[in-house]
Image: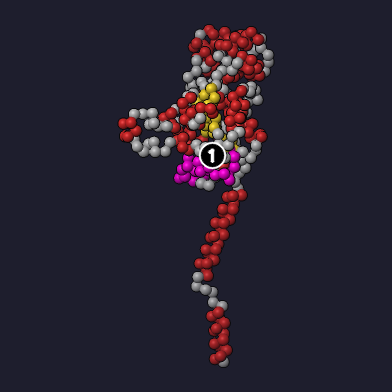
Amino acid sequence: MADASAASHDTYRNDTVPANFFQQCTGNVGRNINNITVLHDRCSKPPPSSTVPFRRDDHFVTRDSLEKTQRICAIPADCAALVGLGGVGKSQIFIEYTYGVRNLSPTKWAFWVHAGTQARFEEGSRRIATATKMDGWNNPKADMLRLVRSWLWEESNGQWVIVVDNTDDSEIFFPLLDRSPASRASNPGQAAELLSDFLPQSSNGSILVTSWSQDMAFRLTDSYASVLGFKQMDEGDALVLLQKKLGFHADRKNATDLLQALDRMPLAITLAAAYIAQRAPCMTVSRCLYEICRSDDAGARLLKNVVGHSRSQTILHLPLPESYL
């Protein structure tokens, strides 16, 4: 009887759960949850898309700068910059380019960052993080600039093209570099990491820059060969653009005179065409020309009255001649 009791006790003792059994189970469950979370994050990554905030212009008139941009960006890690006055059509060229890239290569990302201020540059970076759902994109404490830079560097994230629009203010990208040595010495930490450092030249993608300043364009691309000067349209292209925007063929003499008054600037042509279309049939090309030429103030008021243009609020703050504002 004693032997049976001892055997039973031994059996019970051998079946006893180890002291650290539950800790082991908890650790395994935790690791499994982490693995599942990582797997879910990888599987939930969105396909390549675009953060370009403008629609494609159905009336776009191609220019040689678009072809030059395509040739430059065919080389991995290369950059291109368009330099010219506001309203000359720099952004429109790159809008068309990004849509063309996405059509030809749907697996390529297209990003757009407005660089008029540091705040807007950071906002554009947040949009990139949100679109890609990169690790840490929804962490309010994350440094988005470094996060996006790291993502752009990583080859496994795929190919991309990023447009950095309105890089006109050197103080935003290169603070203190143009100041006196005394000013730089009094602010040693301010220029420790430049905003331009967050635009990595990687074999993964291309960087496209628009600017009024050739110096800024060179600093950001590091190559004068990549800096393309951009002027107003030639008469033929300008006439085609006006007719497309109007939706009809205007009298050539009146149309040519209007284009001359607008300096053949694409955005001015677009706004003038919108002004005519909104007020037709009372407003005609010849009447529009008369109102523009009547006085500088009248010309400024004329195009400032155009409403509903998605980019007009930006343009009205550009230092353009009042004859086509």
Task: Judge from the rendering whether residue 182 lies leftward or rightward of residue 63; answer left or right.
Answer: left
> Looking at the image, which is closer to me, 5 or 321?
321
Q: Name which residue type carries label 1.
A: Ser
Instruction: Tell me where residue 105 sits by quadrant.
Output: top right
Residue identifier under label 1: 202
Instruction: Tell me where residue 250 sits by quadrant.
Output: top right
Colour logic: secondary structure
Residue 48 in view, yes or no = yes
> Looking at the image, which is closer to me, 220 or 260?
220
Instruction: Tell me where residue 57 sits by quadrant.
Output: top right
The quadrant the N terminus occupies is bottom right
Q: Residue, x 59% and y 13% (percent of image)?
A: 259
Q: Position of residue 87 (x, y in %)?
A: 54, 21
Q: Is residue 155 magenta?
A: yes
Stretch in magenta = 137-162
Q: Residue, x 61% and y 44% (percent of image)?
A: 46
Q: Position of residue 7 (x, y in %)?
A: 56, 86
Q: Position of residue 308 (x, y in %)?
A: 57, 23
> Looking at the image, which is closer to me, 126 or 171?
171
> Looking at the image, which is closer to me, 228 or 169?
228
Q: Residue, x 55% and y 62% (percent of image)?
A: 29
Q: Residue, x 61% and y 10% (percent of image)?
A: 256
